[in-house]
Image: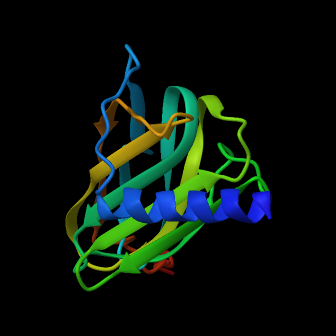
Amino acid sequence: MNRILRTATRVLWIALLCAGALRLAAWADEPAHVSLDPATQQLSRGDMFIIQVRIEDVSDMLGADVSLAFDPSRLQIQFVLPGDLFSPGESTSFYTIDNEAGTLDYAVTLLTNDPVAGDGVLCEIRGRALTLGDAPVTITRAELADSQIHLIPVTTTDGMIRVGAGRAYLPLVAIAPAP
């Protein structure tokens, strides 16, 4: 029963964090860093892309809530995979993709009281480049919570996907020498 109560409490915490209702003062001196890796990609129209949401220099992290914005006329996100920062079976995560609005929300929390520290991949985003042009991918929210459910200060680095015209294939022309 105690385990069910702890799990229910954590699920409620994720819901509050996702709604932006949890605004507690952070205590850490040095901010963690949330970034998109690679920061810049050059793709052709129709190419698949992978973006990792990385967290660096974090300590005592129990959960995370990250939102991204992208140009839905240029990019389509297909799915999201959990990264290596939280151990499988010891965490729960969920995400929502809105390819019409150009948004992605990803939240994860530990099911144990053993917080995460260090660097790692929060999640991996997979999608497709649709049309030509620059497609910024912006971190619109990055909230990390410590084991006391206080927000950890963060800095962020956004990303850019440049979609080019694609590869040009020229026909092979053989010119025979004159007889």
- The image position of residue 125, as x and y in percent, is 50, 63
Residue 50 visible? The answer is: no
Is any atom of residue 69 visible in this view?
yes
The image shows a total of numbered marks equal to 0
| Residue at image point 41% right, 19% down | 28
What residue is drawn where x is 22% and y is 71%? 71
In the rendered image, residue 163, in percent from the top left (x then y), is placed at 29, 66
Q: Is residue 49 above or below residue 74?
A: above
Q: Nearer the viewer, residue 144 or 170?
A: 144
Quarter of the image where one finds residue 140: bottom left
The residue under the point 68% across, 62% down is 5
Image vertical order of residue 102 relative to residue 52, above or below: below
Say if 168 sits above or below 52 in the image.
below
Q: Nearer the viewer, residue 119 or 76?
A: 119
Residue farthest along the top direction in this orientation:
29
Relative placement, left or right, of 7 versus 51 is right
Vertical placement of residue 70 versus 151, above or below: below
Q: Which percent across, then down, holds residue 177? A: 49, 75
Q: Residue furthest front?
A: 1
- Image quadrant where one finds the N terminus: bottom right
Q: Is residue 39 left or right of residue 63?
A: left
Seen at 64% across and 34% down, the residue is 116
Q: Residue furthest bottom?
A: 100
Query: Could you say which is closer to the camera, residue 62 or residue 135?
Result: 62
The figure's colour scheme reads rainbow
